[in-house]
């Protein structure tokens, strides 16, 4: 039977936060899951087009700018969370993204959806960039929109972390949503699907981390109690 000192030492393990290396590996896992988007978007066939009667948005090439800048936002947000986010919120963050990305990838694989190609006029920089995206980035994995669920999940966790930033994150989600429509990359249903799955992932992450913290508190109390005589 372990001594009281050994039980205290073991109980101290529950106070440890994730190391920098562990955080990096968890973020890498999220990226690996999400990267399944690439082969499924390029090589999937069949499926259906989730187009609704209200999907009559024109193509405005200028909207490719916020659409592409999303990648810079995502990378910087993940790096900031990796180095600065407190341990419990980071656990929620990771679980929320793993859940959301995994469910989305399963939808991409088993319920393929696509967006029909558009004819993009113009020879300016934005038109050329959008034409390249349409030609080379694949037309599948429309529902749910990855741009929406990643950006929305970041918005939810960052608004919780920095409450004063909620307005700006809401504005970012709106702009990104419009960019997916005006670049012809997604339909309205894809946006709502992305929002729904992001909110689900957010709550799954918070609940899991809450239970994890409660379990740790209970375990520490049990391990640190003096042995009964």
Image: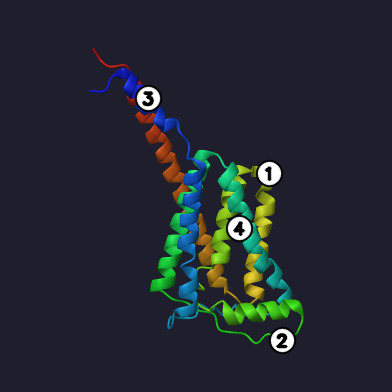
Q: CA distance from mark 2 to mark 4?
A: 29 Å
Measure how far apart labels 1 and 3 are at the Cα level.
Answer: 40 Å
- The answer to whether residue 200 shows anywhere in this view is no
Q: Residues within 10 Å of mark 3 (few under 14, many from 20)?
A: few
Which residue sits at x=65%, y=49%?
A: 166
Q: Are marks 2 and 1 in contact (CB under 8 Å)?
A: no
Q: Nearer the viewer, mark 3 or mark 2?
A: 3
**Element type at mark 3:** helix
Residue 121 circle label: 2
Picture coordinates of residue 137 (x, y %)? 56, 76
Q: Secondary structure at mark 1?
A: helix
Most foreground residue, 92 or 82 = 82
- Asked whether the beta carbons under mark 1 and mark 4 sit within 8 Å of each other, the answer is no
User: Who comes first in sequence, dot 4 or dot 3?
Assistant: 3
User: What residue sits 37% from the left and 35% below the top?
Assistant: 215
Q: Residue at x 43, y 80 (%)?
A: 47
Q: Earlier in the sequence, mark 2 or mark 4?
A: 4
Where's the N terminus, which quadrant? top left
The span from disc 1 to disc 4 (Cα, nearest Å) is 19 Å
Which percent across, then down, holds residue 69?
A: 67, 64
Q: CA distance from mark 3 to mark 2?
A: 68 Å
Classed neighbour count for the residue bearing mark 1: other residues with Cα under 10 Å, few (<14), some (14–19), many (≥20): few
Residue 155: mark: none
- The numbered mark at residue 9 is 3
In the image, taking residue 8 as reference, residue 190 lies left or right, namely right
Q: Which residue is mark 1?
A: 164
In whole angstroms, how far apart are the C-alphas of marks 4 and 3? Answer: 39 Å
- Which of marks 4 and 1 precedes in the sequence? 4
Residue 99 in the figure: left or right of residue 192: left
Residue ranking furthest to the right: 124
């Amino acid at each position: 039977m372990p001594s009281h000192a050994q039980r205290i030492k073991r109980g101290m393990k529950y106070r440890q936060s994730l190391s920098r290396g562990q955080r990096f590996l968890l973020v890498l896992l999220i990226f690996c899951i999400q990267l399944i988007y690439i082969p499924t978007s390029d090589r999937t066939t069949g499926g259906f087009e989730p187009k609704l009667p209200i999907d009559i948005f024109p193509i405005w090439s200028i909207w490719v700018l916020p659409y592409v800048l999303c990648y810079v936002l995502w990378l910087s947000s993940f790096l900031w969370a990796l180095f600065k986010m407190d341990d419990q919120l980071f656990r929620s963050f990771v679980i929320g993204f793993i859940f959301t990305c995994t469910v989305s990838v399963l939808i991409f694989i088993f319920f393929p959806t696509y967006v029909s190609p558009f004819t993009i006029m113009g020879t300016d920089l934005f038109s050329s960039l959008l034409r390249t995206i349409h030609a080379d980035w694949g037309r599948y994995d429309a529902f749910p929109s990855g741009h929406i669920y990643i950006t929305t999940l970041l918005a939810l966790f960052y608004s919780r972390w920095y409450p004063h930033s909620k307005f700006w994150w809401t504005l970012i989600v709106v702009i990104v949503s419009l960019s997916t429509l005006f670049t012809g990359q997604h339909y309205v249903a894809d946006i709502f699907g992305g929002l729904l799955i992001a909110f689900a992932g957010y709550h799954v992450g918070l609940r899991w981390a809450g239970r994890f913290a409660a379990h740790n508190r209970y375990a520490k109390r049990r391990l640190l109690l003096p042995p009964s005589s």
